[in-house]
């Protein structure tokens, strides 16, 4: 079924291309969509132009998302990643774009996936990562050509220590509050049995214990 859907999508693109001028922007976008698996960068470049110039309106589409879905068969989420990944390379790593323009298949095969580039883009603005972390990811994506799963796993491992520290701190907090509540309840009962606390102070202590218990639940 998947193969059948893909072939219909490609056929739809080819049908649209037949009636268009080969030098037109619309034709070139469709051609890039057809060759998407070979190079996403070309499609990202054209989509960037289509989005910025709102060219899709000239072709009868109200929104960029509708154009991507109906004309070239690309979902909104994918289109956004393509745009952002392409712009990231254009502004941060322009030498990668030159590889895409090479006529050699070896150069094209070395191109990173748009998903991996998108992860690198997110890492660039992640305040939890230092320059060393980012440089490591950059090498993995742009030089070693690691796939998206590997890059995602590595990025997660870099960010995770802070999350673990936060979770450990939370556990210590709850554990300390639990001991505090236990101690207060023991002392309250002892002082109540020996009539050491006035009723207002006893009520205040009970309210404090109740607040601590609530805090443990909502923390």
Image: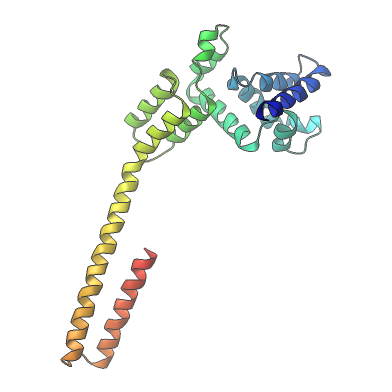
* Viewer-nearest residue: 10 or 206: 10
In the picture as drawn, the residue positioned furthest to the right comes out as: 19
**What residue lies at 20% left-to-right and 75% top-to-bottom?**
183
Residue 156: name its quadrant: top left
Q: Quadrant of residue 104?
A: top right
* Residue shown at the point (31%, 72%) measured from the top left: 212
Q: Return the x and y of residue 190 as percentages of the image width and height.
A: 17, 85
Residue for point 23% across, 92% down: 198
Percent of width and height locating residue 135: 36, 26
Pick the quarter of the image with the C terminus: bottom left
Task: Tally the numbered discs.
Answer: 0
x, y (%) of residue 74? 67, 31
Q: Give the residue at x 74% y 26%.
A: 8
In the depicted structure, whether residue 199 falls above or below residue 123: below
Q: Residue furthest top?
A: 104
Q: Position of residue 56 (x, y in %)?
A: 75, 31
Q: Quadrant of residue 153?
A: top left
As drawn, 141 above or below 105: below
């Amino acid at each position: 079924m998947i193969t059948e859907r893909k072939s219909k999508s490609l056929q739809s693109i080819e049908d649209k291309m037949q009636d268009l001028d080969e030098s037109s922007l619309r034709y070139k976008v469709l051609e890039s969509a057809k060759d998407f698996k070979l190079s996403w960068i070309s499609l990202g470049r054209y989509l960037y132009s289509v989005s910025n110039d709102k060219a899709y309106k000239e072709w009868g589409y109200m929104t960029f998302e509708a154009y991507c879905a109906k004309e070239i068969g690309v979902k909104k989420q994918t289109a956004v990643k393509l745009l952002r990944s392409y712009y990231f390379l254009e502004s941060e790593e322009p030498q990668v774009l030159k590889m895409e323009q090479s006529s050699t298949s070896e150069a094209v095969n070395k191109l990173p996936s748009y998903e991996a580039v998108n992860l690198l883009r997110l890492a660039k603005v992640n305040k939890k990562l230092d320059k060393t972390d980012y440089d490591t990811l950059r090498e993995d994506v742009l030089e070693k050509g690691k796939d998206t799963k590997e890059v995602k796993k590595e990025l997660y491992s870099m960010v995770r220590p802070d999350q673990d520290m936060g979770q450990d701190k939370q556990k210590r907090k709850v554990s300390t509050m639990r001991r505090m509540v236990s101690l207060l309840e023991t002392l309250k009962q002892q002082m109540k049995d020996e009539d050491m606390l006035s009723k207002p102070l006893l009520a205040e202590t009970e309210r404090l214990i109740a607040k601590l218990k609530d805090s443990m639940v909502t923390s």
